[in-house]
Amino acid sequence: MRRRVLDWYAVHARPLPWRDPETTAWGVFVSEVMSQQTPVGRVEPVWREWLARWPTAGDLAAESPGEVVRAWGRLGYPRRALRLREAAVAMVEHHDGEVPQDEDALRSLPGVGAYTAAAVAAFAHGRRTVVVDTNVRRVLARTLQGRAQAAPALTAAESRLAAEVVPQDPETSAVWNVAVMELGALVCRARSPECEACPVRDLCAWVAAGRPADDGPPRRGQAWHGTDRQVRGAIVQTLRESPDAIARAGLEHAVCTRLRLDPARHAAQVDRCVGSLVEDGLVEPVDGDRLRLPA
DNA sequence: TATCCGTGGCT
DNA sequence: TAGCCAAGGAT
């Protein structure tokens, strides 16, 4: 199985810029944070802008939060932009401006969880780690467990399984980790798997079982229309597009217009969301009644 | 552990 | 078309 996946990756890997051997650890770190819950195709152009503008952690650490959120554009979950900047500050203050190599040190950075710490240690520093993302979970669930999808949340059994299949040699392990992810992203996809193109289809327990449908609990869809998330998104988008601070009433109007909401009935929701965004550090009140991205 | 947190393309 | 889903993390 390992040889097949590694050989497949050698031929089919996408030429993502952060996979270039000359990309710095900082570049890899930025790519991993941007890719959290955002398709890599959308990440690539923003990543290029960021690395040209802030080629080191020190460069980003010196930038204002608002400018970082603005440059984040529409990647989604803009709190990640703030945490990425905070991580850069921590690197400057505690790691001599460099991306830590140790998984635990990475884990302690803002916005870095188990996945990102393992991924950066492996892909930026060549460490042997166990990278478990949604792609890896799905590939292992199908090939080894014969299930259509992984469990809703990562289980201890899954982590053990993932750890068992990572090659011992550090260099090979790093390629293995990215290769399984790539297989999940390109072939062993969640919705329309392309089993005919899979290098391990004849070893796959799910294929052997006749590709049975998922037998797990029904997934809860993410509500969107009319939610605080939608309103928060519209608020930040409006402020991103405005070079100057905006009066609260003007912001309410702009957001309701953008979302086609009745201002009379949604002013309170917009206000509540502004409050939560201020708490998150994504919005900053100025001059009493005006709002802007944080300076 | 369940829920919250953006955005947009795909089926 | 409406829902599903994407290199997760924090609480």
Image: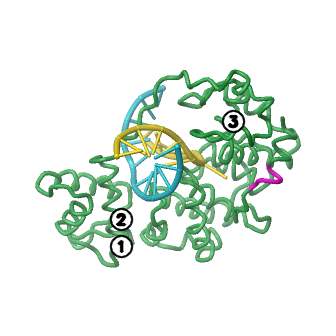
Chain colours: A green, B cyan, C yellow
Looking at the image, which residue is at 35% across and 63% down?
A236
Residue A279 quadrant: bottom left
Mark 2 to mark 3: distance in Å? Answer: 36 Å
Residue A221 quadrant: top left
Q: Is residue A124 left or right of residue A236?
A: right
- Name the residue beneath numbered marker 1: A241
Give the secondary structure at mark 1.
helix
Q: Position of residue A92 (x, y in %)?
A: 62, 66
Q: Is residue A67 left or right of residue A284?
A: right
Asked if marks 1 and 2 touch (Cβ < 8 Å), the reply is yes
Looking at the image, which residue is at 58% across and 54% down?
A35
Q: Earlier in the sequence, mark 3 or mark 1?
A: 3
Residue A139's disc number:
3
Q: Is residue A276 left or right of residue A149?
A: left
Highlighted magenta segment, given as a residue range: A9-13
Query: What is the three-letter code of the residue carrying label 3?
Result: Val
Looking at the image, which residue is at 16% across and 66% down?
A249
